[in-house]
């Protein structure tokens, strides 16, 4: 079976995020004072062949630890779309 | 004669300058392609700067998977000298051969300018010809040069004397002169054994007087000195 998996990568909590700060300032300049705690990261989407959603998530976790995210600078979250694609 | 391999990745830069700096320091330099699997008997390896693989995903993240990296890992494990300059530093961090990581500059801007750095550790194959505490001015050119590591690791690096260069002003003060927001103004670090060094400044870009300064020359002459005093090699 194939699963659609989404990985959301954000700068590690507590680490200076100059991009997030710059976007927050820009939002403030556009008069969105309600926006705060802005962070800019990246999203990776991939199809994963696995017997179950849990197995797909476990495989992507290994991919994150080995390549997709840098544990020193980044945190990540994994979401598997419900229902296998094939 | 000392033989130095300069590794070329797709998107490397300043590799001819690195070769020339090695040659001016009395060594022989040659290129190794990133898809090669052997360092051809080199005594030392230099990973040059640049934007390997377009910095896709993260700077150095893809380059560290290159076939040549296994040979570099073995070379480093054998205690032989490895120098990563700028993108080379990023690659060595991504490969786990050096601690920490290089994140986006605090000011967000790509920095292309001279910086002053203080030589904190001279017991490495690349800094032994400098005086401890000496301040030198070298060029930097990077968008992701902010050295980041957990506090405990930073404390460990300091305790073990593994900070090799620190951003400073010309008087040697580091606090106001940190150009990219690096933790503890760290510009270069080494591994536990001291044979693997990564630095954000580009010594090969300023290694002969015709350019106005040869402040970077001693990075390469240090290597010559080191190879004479402690011959390694295949």
Image (spheres, coloured by chain):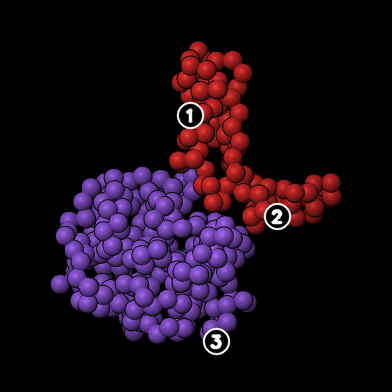
Chain colours: A red, B purple
Q: Secondary structure at mark 2?
A: helix
Residue beneath the point at 58% across and 82% down: B173
Whole-percent x, y for residue B200 in the image: 45, 66
The answer to which image quadrant residue B26 occupies is bottom left
Q: Secondary structure at mark 1?
A: helix
Residue beneath the point at 26% across and 75% down: B226
Residue labelled with disc 1: A59
Q: CA distance from mark 2 to mark 1?
A: 33 Å
Compared with A83, A8 (above or below) is below
Chain of the residue on which disc 1 is drawn:
A
| Residue furthest out toward the top | A86
Compared with B181, A41 (above or below) is above
Q: Are marks 2 and 1 on the same chain?
A: yes
Compared with B66, B88 (above or below) is below
Instruction: Locate residue B97 relative to residue A15 in the image: left or right.
Output: left
Residue labelled with disc 2: A21
Residue beneath the point at 36% across and 57% down: B12
Chain of the residue on which disc 2 is drawn:
A
Count of numbered tags? 3
Residue labelled with disc 3: B171
* Residue depth check, mark 2 versus mark 1: number of the one nearer the observer: 1
Residue beneath the point at 20% across and 66% down: B232
Instruction: Locate residue B202 relative to residue B177 in the image: left or right.
Output: left
The answer to which image quadrant residue B14 occupies is bottom left
Q: Give yes or no for contact between labels 1 and 3 (Cβ–Cβ under 8 Å).
A: no
Residue B192 visible in the displayed image: yes
User: For mark 2, does the 10 Å Cα neighbourhood hold few (<14), some (14 to 19), or many (20 or more) residues?
Assistant: some
Q: Are marks 2 and 3 on the same chain?
A: no
Compared with B221, B62 (above or below) is above
Residue B143 visible in the displayed image: no
Quarter of the picture containing the C terminus of chain B is bottom left
């Amino acid at each position: 079976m194939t699963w659609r998996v989404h990985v959301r990568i954000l700068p590690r909590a507590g680490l200076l995020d100059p991009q997030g700060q710059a976007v927050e300032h820009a939002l403030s300049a556009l008069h969105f004072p309600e926006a705060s705690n802005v962070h800019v990261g990246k999203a990776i989407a991939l199809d994963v062949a696995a017997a179950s959603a849990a197995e797909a998530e476990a495989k992507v976790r290994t991919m994150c630890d080995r390549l997709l995210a840098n544990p020193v600078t980044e945190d990540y979250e994994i979401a598997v779309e419900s229902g296998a694609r094939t | 004669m000392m033989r130095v391999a300069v590794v070329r990745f797709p998107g490397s830069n300043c590799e001819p300058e690195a070769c020339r700096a090695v040659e001016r320091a009395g060594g022989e330099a040659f290129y190794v392609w990133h898809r090669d699997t052997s360092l051809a008997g080199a005594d030392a390896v230099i990973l040059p700067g640049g934007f390997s693989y377009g910095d896709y995903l993260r700077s150095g993240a893809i380059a560290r998977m290159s076939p040549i990296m296994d040979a570099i890992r073995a070379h480093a494990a054998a205690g032989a000298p490895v120098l990563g300059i700028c993108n080379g530093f990023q690659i060595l961090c991504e490969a786990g051969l050096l601690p920490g990581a290089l994140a986006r500059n605090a000011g967000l801007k790509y920095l292309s300018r001279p910086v002053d750095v203080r030589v904190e550790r001279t017991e490495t194959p690349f800094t032994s010809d400098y005086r401890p505490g000496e301040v030198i001015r070298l060029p930097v050119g990077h968008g992701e040069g902010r050295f980041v590591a957990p506090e405990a690791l930073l404390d460990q690096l300091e305790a073990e004397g593994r900070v090799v260069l620190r951003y400073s002003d010309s008087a040697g003060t580091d606090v106001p002169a940190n150009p990219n927001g690096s933790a503890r103004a760290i510009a270069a670090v080494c591994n536990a054994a001291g044979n693997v060094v990564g630095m954000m400044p580009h010594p090969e870009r300023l290694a002969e007087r015709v350019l106005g300064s040869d402040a970077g020359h001693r990075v390469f002459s240090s290597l010559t000195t080191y190879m004479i005093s402690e011959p390694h090699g295949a």
